[in-house]
Amino acid sequence: MPKSPTPPASPSRKGSAASNAPGDAGSKAAARNTDSAPATAPTDDGGDVALQKAVETGQLAAAFPFNANKAGEHGFDQGVTPPAGATATPPSRVPLGSTLSERQTNDKVGTQAPEGRNATIAPLDRVRVDSSGQMLTTNQGVRIADNQNSLKAGPRGPVLLEDFILREKITHFDHERIPERIVHARGSAAHGFFECYDAITDL
């Protein structure tokens, strides 16, 4: 006689409540994601900056339970002179940044963005470059003395991979799985040429 299947054990009430708690460990772990968020954000950041961003973002979203600006989207008068929409004040600047790395300050990245200012819409004069009289450097800022001769073991020995300039050239070269896709550098047949062995008159 076949045995009847055993019904699955029902989860305990304590475990079920813990898994649905807003501030449980699973919710906090999901809140640290940068491309998604938990259905219920944790209520306590516990001193974690990533959780603080998630918590304060949830608080900022909770300030708009509905779209109060919807009524101003219709009508001719609203189109000619649109009213100012409803706004909310965030608890801090943390939920307004695109990334938490904006908190880092050093000589290279500078300081934090000035409050209330968008520097990306300013003229480009501040980022224009004049390379006259400047040394040629690698990606790491090391000045290049000779970019035409590689480091060799002896006068005619093999090229050494200790040549960091050569390694940078290799990583920037056109790596392709299919040879026909390679972009030839410095003139035709610089790295060989392709020969057609069959007639293609039907093309």
Image (cartoon, helix red, strand yellow):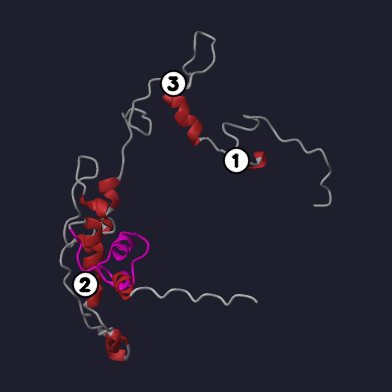
- The residue carrying mark 3 is 162
Nearer-the-camera pick, 24 or 159: 24
Amino acid on which the number 1 mark rests in the picture: Glu
Task: Label 1, secondary structure: give it.
Answer: loop
- The residue carrying mark 2 is 59
Q: Is residue 160 left or right of residue 40?
A: right
Give the overall secondary structure of the magenta segment: loop
Q: Gap between marks 1 and 3, in whole Å?
A: 24 Å
Q: Gap between marks 2 and 3, in whole Å?
A: 54 Å
Vertical arrangement, residue 107 with respect to residue 71, above or below: above
Residue plotted at (45% across, 31% down): 168
Q: In this rendering, which labeled residue sits more in front, label 1 or label 3? A: 3
As drawn, the label of residue 62 is: none
Vertical arrangement, residue 20 with respect to residue 112, above or below: below
- The residue carrying mark 1 is 176
Q: Gap between marks 2 and 1, in whole Å?
A: 49 Å
Q: Position of residue 151 (x, y in %)?
A: 46, 17
Label count reads 3
2 and 1 marks in contact (CB < 8 Å): no
Q: Is residue 28 magenta?
A: yes
Q: Where does the N terminus fall, quadrant-wise?
A: bottom right
Compare marks 2 and 3 and give the one earlier in the sequence.
Answer: 2
Residue plotted at (32% across, 63% down): 26
Task: Label 3, secondary structure: give it.
Answer: loop
Q: Position of residue 118 (x, y in %)?
A: 23, 60
Q: Position of residue 55 (x, y in %)?
A: 23, 66
Amino acid on which the number 3 mark rests in the picture: Glu
Residue furthest to the front: 1
Task: Label 2, secondary structure: give it.
Answer: helix
Q: Is residue 42 magenta?
A: yes
First to last magenta residue range: 19-46
